[in-house]
Image: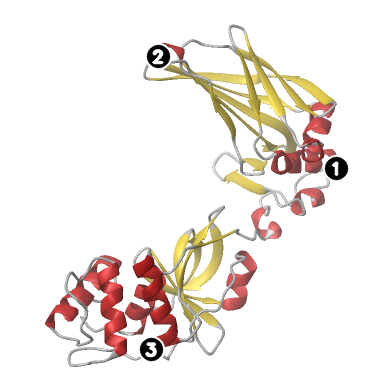
């Protein structure tokens, strides 16, 4: 860690305070319009990538999964909440055979930290450095020139930096396009809620959710006592004649050896409590285990409890089965309450 820190400081002194950086999206994917190396535009799903630099036209150069892309800075800022300055492109010259000095030394130290050089860095770009650069380029899907061009140097720099974890900013109009204008309920509260939409274009069914699963492993010490249960709160959308229906619901699931035969659920937050019935229960086998999955349409009392979970600082769920009962608790009640608040405002 000390070595990497020292090298990063060296790179900053050599290149200025702006640093290429690795970025990871907490709630991927973040969709953005990008251009590939051939100039072809596409919708790029960002999850874990390197942001290498910015050109003079307000475009970022990105690297993800062996390819580089250009993205308008304003478009990237719309979908990602990352911070920090990135290098200006065009300031990194290509260094190759015969080059000497601090830039070569920094390059060698970077390659050594990443495992491509085993010998002591000497600041001279020779055969060994060329082989190391070529090996790095091959591993990263770059043209194998053996010369450290700007992209190669920036990518090495970014891989030595600390990953910045960022949240995706969702464009509600784009995300909820499959149901906008097609339902009788007022979905404006949903568009403003910060919830995400999981949509299956083939079936026409979707699930509006906070993106979190509340789960608990209640298994015993042996495989004969395996009980893994989970719930997800959301709003189910389904194609219907003339439009789309929107139903507040809780998806329940249990992986177990002995069937619990789920039939009911209770939601509690503070002094608010509501109960509902498990519907559409489906059962399948996974090896020796049974998987039960069902839907619990949320009653008004359940919606009120869910909406108040953030203020109450708790959200407790009890799943009732014919042979087994399970108790779960949300680690982030405020996130779960987003569903309840959106459901309570539907008209």
Left/right placement of residue 182 relative to residue 204 reads right
Sequence-wise first label, 1 or 3: 3
Sequence-wise first label, 2 or 3: 3
Q: Identify the residue shown where x is 57% and y is 52%.
A: 27
Query: In what element is the residue under mark 3?
Result: loop
Q: Position of residue 22 (x, y in %)?
A: 45, 67
Q: Quadrant of residue 300?
A: top right
Q: Identify the residue shown where x is 81% and y is 49%.
A: 189
Left/right placement of residue 53 relative to residue 170 reads left
Sequence-wise first label, 2 or 1: 2
| Spatial separation of the CA atoms under disc 1 and disc 3 | 54 Å
Identify the residue position indicated by label 3 in the image: 92
**Quadrant in the picture for the C terminus:** top right
Q: Position of residue 37 (x, y in %)?
A: 38, 77
* Residue extending farthest front: 2
Identify the residue position indicated by label 1 in the image: 345
Q: Position of residue 83 (x, y in %)?
A: 59, 71
Identify the residue position indicated by label 2 in the image: 222
């Amino acid at each position: 860690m000390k070595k990497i820190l020292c090298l990063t400081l060296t790179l900053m002194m050599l290149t200025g305070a702006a640093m290429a950086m690795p970025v990871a999206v907490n709630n991927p994917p973040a969709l953005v319009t990008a251009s590939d190396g051939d100039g072809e535009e596409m919708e790029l799903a960002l999850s874990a990538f390197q942001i290498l630099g910015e050109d003079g036209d307000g475009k970022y150069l990105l690297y993800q999964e062996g390819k580089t892309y250009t993205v308008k800075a304003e478009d990237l800022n719309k979908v990602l909440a990352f911070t920090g300055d990135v290098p200006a492109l065009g300031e990194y010259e290509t260094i190759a055979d015969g080059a000497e000095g601090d830039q070569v030394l920094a390059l060698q130290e970077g390659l050594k930290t990443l495992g491509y050089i085993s010998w002591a860095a000497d600041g001279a770009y020779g055969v060994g450095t060329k082989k190391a650069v070529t090996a790095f380029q091959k591993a990263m899907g770059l043209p194998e020139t053996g010369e450290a061009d700007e992209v190669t140097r920036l990518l090495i720099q970014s891989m030595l930096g600390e990953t910045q974890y960022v949240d995706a900013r969702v464009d509600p109009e784009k995300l909820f396009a499959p149901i906008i204008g097609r339902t009788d309920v007022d979905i404006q509260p949903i568009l403003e809620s910060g919830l995400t939409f999981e949509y299956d274009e083939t079936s026409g069914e979707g699930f509006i959710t906070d993106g979190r699963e509340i789960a608990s492993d209640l298994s015993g010490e042996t495989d004969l006592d395996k009980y893994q249960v989970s719930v997800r709160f959301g709003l189910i959308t389904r194609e219907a004649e003339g439009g789309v229906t929107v139903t507040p619901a809780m998806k329940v699931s249990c992986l177990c050896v002995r069937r619990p035969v789920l039939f009911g659920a209770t939601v509690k937050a503070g002094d608010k409590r509501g109960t509902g019935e498990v519907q559409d229960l489906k059962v399948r086998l996974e090896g020796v285990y049974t998987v039960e999955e069902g839907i619990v349409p949320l009653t008004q009392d359940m919606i009120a409890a869910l909406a108040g979970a953030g203020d109450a600082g708790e959200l407790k769920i009890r799943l009732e089965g014919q042979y087994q009962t399970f108790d779960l608790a949300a680690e982030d009640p405020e996130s779960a309450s987003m569903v309840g608040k959106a459901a309570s405002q539907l008209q």
